[in-house]
Image (cartoon, rainbow, N blue to C red):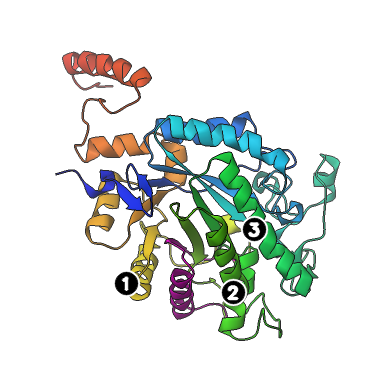
Amino acid sequence: MTPKLFTPLTIRGLTLPNRVVISPMAQYSADDGIANDWHLVQYGRFAVGGAGVVTVEATAVTREGRITNGDLGLWSADHVGPLARIAAFLKANGSVPSIQLAHSGRKGSSQRPWHGNGPLTAADIARGDEQWQPVAPSAVPLGEGWLTPAVLDEAGVLALRDAFVAAARRALEAGFEIAEIHAAHGYMLHQFLSPIANHRTDRWGGDQAGRMALPLAVARGIRDAWPADKPVFLRLSMVDGSEGGLSQEDQVAFARALKQVGVDMVVASSGGMAGSATNQRGPNRVYGFQVPFAERIRREAGIATMAVGLIVDGRQAERILQEERADLIAVGRQALEDPNWALHAKAALEVDTNHQTWPAQHGWWMAQRDRVLERLGPWVP
């Protein structure tokens, strides 16, 4: 019997060839939001490596919605063509192209991670980065030394919703099949959800219903703009990872509301409200540490989920699916280590032990190599 990890999954009118999803991992390498050859190779290698879905990194819906100067964007028609090249390559090589739509909120105008992951400095400006005024639900900076964000007024909140929807339409034009809404890791929609960052007293804040209002409006708008036969996903942080933040119960209720507005899949992550998203505060890190979040949302909210977080082995992923703790498996940094993760998982699960399902350009080379290694036996130092 075929392992569940390599069984197709149909969501609405879209069939995923397998349950392996490459997580969005920001490359901070765009120029004014424009994708380039780095992005084509970065995402293309995962399709060649057998992943069922490849998700392009957090892509800003407005220019000030970038995290860093290097973020991808979809705030104009100029961004569509370079992204379309990526989506077309993914499709041509057997993967479903997905894109994560995002706004940084108070985390905007930051350094690239390899330059410090903090507020921009004079050294960053000297190397050509620009600084801009971030916006957020409330005038609460991320921390000491960070810019205080400007507060979005009513018109600004509605314009933000519309920017997400417009970016989704451009993503569709570029050929993406799945739209993922980024409402996690301390970015704008997560900021609206969390009492730590949202101190508003109007209809976009206050109680839980008010704090959920904008993320739900964005989800509803994208669902209406996205074709009925294509899925919409949303990534959330199950906990803020900071005292006084969101509870798991809050996010289960949010997931129930997402299902009502037509979101098809929740990606259950955590943390990021304090500090950088790449240095999240959250649960103790063990293998599969966020799987219980996906399991709880799936069970209590009745919506499909994607598990993410230190899932490193195909047998581990298969167990999660067999135990019905999630519907899809997201692989991130492990795929950077091994872009052929999905193909190697096939071998580990004995779906393909002789490279038959590898791309033809690679498989015949590997089959020759296998015959030589079988004759030579194990290498001994």
Quadrant of the rendered structure where residue 70 is? top right
Q: For residue 193, which numbered disc appears in the image?
A: 2
Residue 104 visible from this viewpoint: no
Picture quarter with the C terminus: top left
In the figure, 53 relative to 286: above or below? Answer: above
Tell me, yes or no, whether the highlighted magenta stretch contains residue 180.
no
Choose mark 3 or mark 2, whichever is in front. 3
**Residue type at tag 3:** Phe
Residue 269 is covered by the magenta coloring: yes
Q: From the viewer's perspective, is residue 373 above or below residue 46?
A: above
Q: Which residues are magenta?
A: 244-272
Q: Residue at x 65, y 39 (%)?
A: 80
For the residues labelled 3 and 1, the Cα–Cα distance comes to: 29 Å
Res. 164 mark? 3
Mark 3 crowd level (few <14, some 14–19, many ≥20, 10 Å Cα): many
**Which of the marked residues, 2 or 1, is nearer the chain's N terminus?**
2
- Vertical relation: 138 (above or below) 24: below
Q: Residue at x 46, y 47 (%)?
A: 332
Discs 3, 2 touching: Cβ within 8 Å: no
Amino acid marked by disc 1 = Arg
Q: Quadrant of residue 339?
A: top left
Q: Secondary structure at mark 3?
A: helix
Residue identifier under label 1: 299
Per the model, the C-alpha gap separating discs 3 and 2 is 16 Å
How many labels sit on residues? Answer: 3
Which of labels 3 and 1 is toward the front? 3
Say which label, 3 or 1, has the lower sequence index: 3
* Mark 1: secondary structure: helix
